[in-house]
Image (spheres, rainbow, N blue to C red):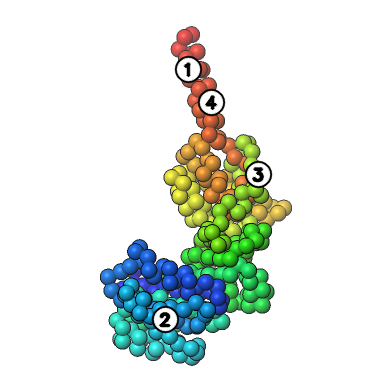
Amino acid sequence: MNEPDVMVYLMTGFLDSGKTGFLKFTLKQDYFQIDGKTLLILCEDGEDEYDAMEMLRYGVVIERLEDREELTEEYLAELDRKHEPDRVVIEYNGMWKVSDFENMKLPKGWGIEQKITTVDASTFQTYLTNLKPLFVEMVRGAEMVLFNRCEDIKPLAGYRRSVKVVSPQAEVIFEDEQGEVENIFEDDVPYDLDAPVIEIPREDYSATEFTRLVEDNDCRVMNLMIRPDEKTGIWKACLRIDREDATPVLRSLERFDYRVVSCYQLHGVMDERIEQRIKELMYYLEM
């Protein structure tokens, strides 16, 4: 599929979930700069605000709208003619159906490149209980879901599952005041040295994610077999990689809430086997 001429970045999340803070930071970063104009469309006003003059220094022009009825195909076409943007970033209203925008005919050359959702972990359960359909639309098809204000790590595994059941491919990140929260699930995942079996709920299974987690640790997947448990419905994966020490991969799997039942050929096991084979070979040669 060809890349759109004008990439559209769709930022979703409920009010005060951190959308503006995330975008203010990102739009100023060197890695996000382009040769051209970025059109930032704001669909709601939160506690955090943009400095229009400061944004101009980064090639960002801002347009605001108040009502859902204003966001039409004609309105977007008008902005396209007015600004001729090279990139579009939309901070979407958390109370509007995301599908309304996703089903809209965009101006020629525009195309949604990335969808990111921010979530306030301290209010997530309340929003999920009362506004679940809106949340589902926010995370469906999202590349990244960022939970901030994660003061209590206990419910985070459940929060992650709430996202993965809707959008298995999404990268789910948790942050507190110090930054990204790591090793959230480390204490809950036991493993031994018998065989490489990982238990996976069906809604969490994604071969693409498995491969990514392995390759992120400079490894390759040599073999991957999947089978469901008839009694529990849990899917079990037997994973073989081209590395003696599987510890980095295990940590990545644990971090992303996979339950590693057992592991085989951790660091040192292969060395022992090679040593034994050499001894057998030498014994054979001396015969």
Q: Nearer the viewer, mark 1 or mark 3?
A: 3
- Image mark for residue 190: 3
Specify the quadrant that holds the N terminus.
bottom left
**Which is more foreground, mark 4 or mark 1?**
4
The residue positioned 31% from the left and 87% from the top of the image is 82
- Tell me the tag on residue 272: 4
Amino acid under disc 2? Ile
The alpha-carbon separation of the residues under discs 2 and 3 comes to 47 Å
Kind of residue indicated by mark 1: Leu
| Badge 4 or badge 2: first in the primary sequence | 2
Among the two numbered marks 1 and 3 on one chain, the one whose residue lies closer to the N terminus? 3
Residue 54, given in percent of the width and then of the height, sits at: 36, 76
Instruction: List the residue tagged with mark 1.
Output: 281
Marks 3/4: CA distance? 24 Å
Cα–Cα gap, marks 4 and 1: 14 Å
Provide residue 265's location: percent of width, then percent of height. 55, 35
Q: Earlier in the sequence, mark 2 or mark 3?
A: 2
Residue bearing the label numbered 2 = 41
Q: What element carries label 3?
A: loop
Can you say whether 241 is above or below 153 in the image?
above
Q: Is residue 164 above or below residue 226?
A: below
239 in relation to 83, above or below: above
Q: Is residue 111 visible?
A: no
